[in-house]
Image (cartoon, rainbow, N blue to C red):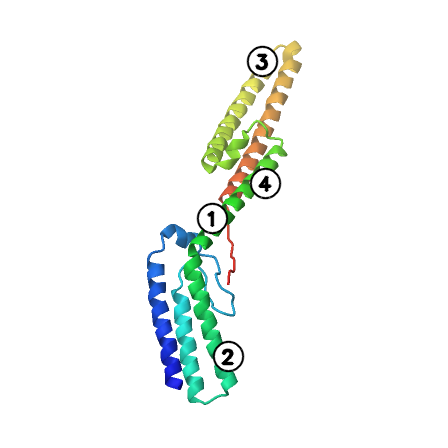
Amino acid sequence: MTSELLNRLRVQHKQLEQEVLQHDAMLPKGERRLLQDTERFNDELFIQSGAELKPCIEQIAKSIKQLEKLLKNKVSLNTIALSCERIQDRFTAVRRALSTTTLGVKSAQQQKASRIAQARSRRKKSHDQSGFNWIAAGVMQNSHQLYEELNKHHNWVKKFEQKIQSLQSELENCHSADKIKKQNEILLVHRRLGKCRQAISYIEDRIQAFERPYTHSNRRY
């Protein structure tokens, strides 16, 4: 009876192992990346995360060996029954995972799209409230465009600084009647320069927020 029970479990394990190895070998790289941080099982069943299920097979093999030791030590039937039940629960969970990897990928894709949409919405709202409305809202959704916008503002800073130097030179040499007008021009360019520098800090913050990686984990079974 004891050997028959162990043999039956080992046969189930071997069959499931072949299915799992085939499953893992056929996983596209994109799906591996999507599920790499996803916990697909309850901690009480397996310590596992990601798309590959081979770690589960290895843990089931250890459970069967533990059961074999229990049988040799002639522990109570209740303890044996609980161990067998746990092993069967693990078999069931892995079979379910084999059939639902595609659903898991779709769920991960939806969650990723949702996070991206929420992040875009937050960036747009932040942008609308920032006071930098001359920067197109669409720029906030693209890191390449953000870098272009940053470079553009750095160029404006140089032009404003050159303009201020030119105006100050003109101020020193202009007629006294024109000095107030020239001073107002310098003040106006200084304001534009200050606003441009503020925008540079704002864009740099947006770049950091845009490029910050997302992490997540979801338990399924």
Label 3: how many Cα within 10 Å (few below 14, some 14–19, many 20+): few
Disc 4: which residue: 122
* Callout 4 secondary element: helix
* Callout 1 secondary element: helix
The residue drawn where x is 50% and y is 44% is: 113
Residue 178, position as x, y percentages in the image: 64, 11
Nearer the observer: mark 3 or 4; the answer is 4
Q: Amino acid at mark 3?
A: Asn
Residue 88, position as x, y percentages in the image: 45, 73
Nearer the observer: mark 1 or 4; the answer is 1
Nearer the observer: mark 4 or 2; the answer is 2
Q: Amino acid at mark 1?
A: Gln
In the displayed structure image, the side of residue 16 where residue 192 appears, left or right: right
Disc 2: which residue: 82
Q: Amino acid at mark 2?
A: Leu
The mark total stands at 4
Q: Earlier in the sequence, mark 2 or mark 1?
A: 2
Marks 1 and 4, how far apart in space? 20 Å
Q: Amino acid at mark 4?
A: Arg
Q: Is residue 164 above or below residue 210?
A: above
Residue 109 is marked as: 1
Q: Is residue 213 above or below residue 192?
A: below
Marks 3 and 2, how far apart in space? 97 Å
The residue drawn where x is 47% and y is 35% is: 147
The residue drawn where x is 58% and y is 19% is: 168
Nearer the observer: mark 3 or 1; the answer is 1
Marks 4 and 2, how far apart in space? 50 Å
Nearer the observer: mark 3 or 2; the answer is 2
Disc 3: which residue: 173
Q: Earlier in the sequence, mark 4 or mark 2?
A: 2
Marks 3 and 1, how far apart in space? 66 Å
Q: Say if mark 4 contacts mark 2, CB within 8 Å.
A: no
